[in-house]
Image (cartoon, rainbow, N blue to C red):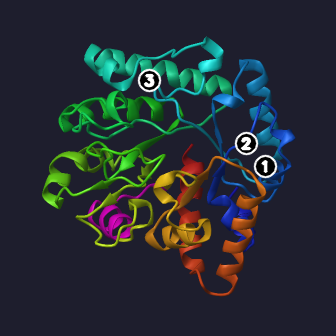
Amino acid sequence: MEDLFQKLNTEQKLYQMFILGYEGENPHACPNLTNALKSGLGGVIFFTQNIYDKERFKNAVQMIKEDALISPFLSIDQEGGRVERTLNLYGKSHYLSAREAAKCGKNTVKQQTQWISEELKYLGLNMNFAPVLDVDTNPDNPVIADRSYSSNPEEVIKYGKIAVETYIKNGIIPVGKHFPGHGDTAADSHIEMPETALDIEELEKIHIKPFKALCDILPAIMVAHVHYKAFDNEKIPASVSSNIINGYLRNKLNFKGLVISDDMVMGGIKRFTPFEACKRAINAGVNMFIYRNSDDSTTNLIEQLANAVEKGEIDINKIDKSLDYIRLIKKCF
């Protein structure tokens, strides 16, 4: 794998920085995904629409592995509760939400994380966008709520640590989300860009606290499409904020893992064109982008970014730095 990374051209390096989804059960019905995998795609994300039968899905995952130039991250949002991608297998939620599991105690959180890990391994996956490390402090929050372990940061740390360690023990890459904390917002970042006016002291005391406590053991963190006034006067989400990613997460918290964006087709990032959003995010320190679609627009975006690198509009050193993080995690898992 090391030799393959060293031989990548600029466009292939950019493909490594993307995690793409596809429609339906058969990945070969999506030529863009197949071509992306052969061009060095860094990862694939799976949704409910991809999983109707365990054996058919395992075969689809194997097809993806065989098409890939470099072994990809095979990822999913399998939190438990209302965010599960295996609903078609069981007809309903198969696992407890984070809040419900936490109410049952440490053994339940550990056992449930073990079961999720075993199922993901059986299906051939190696990355889970979990645990949610947001602290649920706003009762009007439409998107976090029971996805959070607790409204108490110490409880989130306690249960989040159990989840992270259990995933890692089972060879699943856990991705803590949504940095620097989505728990106080009153809007859904899938639809629009939420804003929080909390000052830095409040953020550090509550919302950043779980990430700070666990950043030494987390291999990856997902950044939110939320605007934090404490960090930026300009109305931009954390996912394109150099103050938050380069300045705080990297330099202050000394995070050494992979920084991944939330889905880049969400409403919270729509104020920018896809090219401008990715360009700003790369400069801010994002290492990988999630796009749920493998359509022509995504392929064209990667080509556009590669051209911008060749022209010197995007620093190739930032691309190479991202590949260092990606290569390290892939080597470890």
Q: Secondary structure at mark 2?
A: loop
Task: Please give the name of the residue rendered at 58% of the width and 80% of the height, measured from the top-left corner.
Answer: 314
Label 2 CA crowd tier, 10 Å (few <14, some 14–19, many 20+): many
Q: Marks 1 and 3, how far apart in space?
A: 30 Å
Name the quadrant of the N terminus. Answer: bottom right
Task: Residue type at mark 1: give it.
Answer: Leu
Within 10 angstroms of label 3, few (less than 14), some, or many (20 or more) residues? many
Q: Earlier in the sequence, mark 2 or mark 1?
A: 2
Q: Where does residue 150 sit, x and y in percent of width and height?
A: 25, 30
Q: Marks 2/3: CA distance?
A: 26 Å
Q: Disc 3 on helix, strand or loop? A: helix
> Does residue 193 appear in the picture of this structure?
yes
Residue where numbered disc 3 is placed: 113
In the picture of the structure, the residue carrying the numbered disc 2 is 22
**The C terminus is located in which quarter?**
top right
Q: Amino acid at mark 2?
A: Tyr
Quick check: 319 left or right of 213?
A: right
User: Residue 265, relative to residue 58: is it above or below?
Assistant: below
Q: Is residue 8 visible?
A: no
Label 1 sits on residue: 33
Q: Which residue is rendered at x = 31% and y = 24% of the image?
A: 99
Q: Earlier in the sequence, mark 1 or mark 3?
A: 1
Magenta range is 243-259
Three-letter amino acid code at the position of disc 3: Thr
Left or right placement of residue 299 versus residue 122 in this view: right
Label 2 close to label 3 by CB (< 8 Å)? no
